[in-house]
Image (cartoon, grey):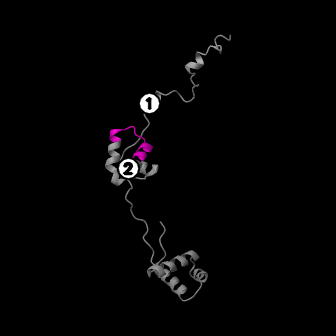
Amino acid sequence: MARPYSLDLRERVVRCVESGETVRAVAALYGVSVSCVVKWSLRYRASGSAAPGKMGGHRQPLLEKERSFVLARIEENPDITLRGLQAELAERGIAASYGAVWAFVHAQGKSFKKNRAALRTKPPAHSKAQRTMAEISRPDRPSPARLR
């Protein structure tokens, strides 16, 4: 992770700008970018210090307050989809992205695996489409057996 420039360097840069030097000249003199000089000067004018702001930190998950609701819904309906869970949270006034719902559920040790038994009940994807009963029993079209 990148570290901020030292406070000593920041203070020297700000002093030069305050003394009347141009931003570009100060940037060239200290070997920093022009945008750094501008930002440090603005920070100094706003707060009285050119010290860097807080970096990093821990953010509490968005859905932590809804933990009991989410886990209860998964227990009630194990086949619920993440999109369905996201929609139910939206009904409760919680705007959460699909990724946030997935990350929360994954962190709770829950997983949504495909049900192999349910997949076997569907026709294979590469099979020919089944004809409907209307196509089979239409009297105006001869059946393939009668064409021979």
Residue at 39 percent across and 50 percent down: it is 104
Picture coordinates of residue 141, whole percent (x, y)? 65, 15
Residue at 48 percent across and 83 percent down: it is 11
Mark 2 to mark 1: distance in Å?
Answer: 31 Å
8 and 38: which is toward the camera: 38
User: What's the amino acid at mark 2?
Assistant: Arg
Element at label 1: helix
**Residues drawn in magenta:** 74-88
Residue 84 on the magenta span: yes
- Report crowding for label 2: few under 14, some 14 to 19, many 20 or more residues within 10 A (C-alpha): few
Picture coordinates of residue 36, whole percent (x, y)? 54, 76
Q: Is residue 106 visible?
A: no
Residue 110: quadrant of the picture? top left
- Report crowding for label 1: few under 14, some 14 to 19, many 20 or more residues within 10 A (C-alpha): few
38 and 89: which is toward the camera: 89
Query: In the image, which disc is placed on residue 92?
Result: 2
What residue is shown with label 1?
118
Q: Residue furthest bottom?
A: 19
Picture coordinates of residue 43, whole percent (x, y)? 48, 78
Residue 73: quadrant of the picture? top left
- Rendered-image quadrant of the C terminus: top right
Q: Is residue 60 above or below residue 47?
A: above
Residue at 56 percent across and 75 percent down: it is 35
Q: Is residue 65 above or below residue 110?
A: below
Residue 25 on the magenta span: no
Element at label 2: loop
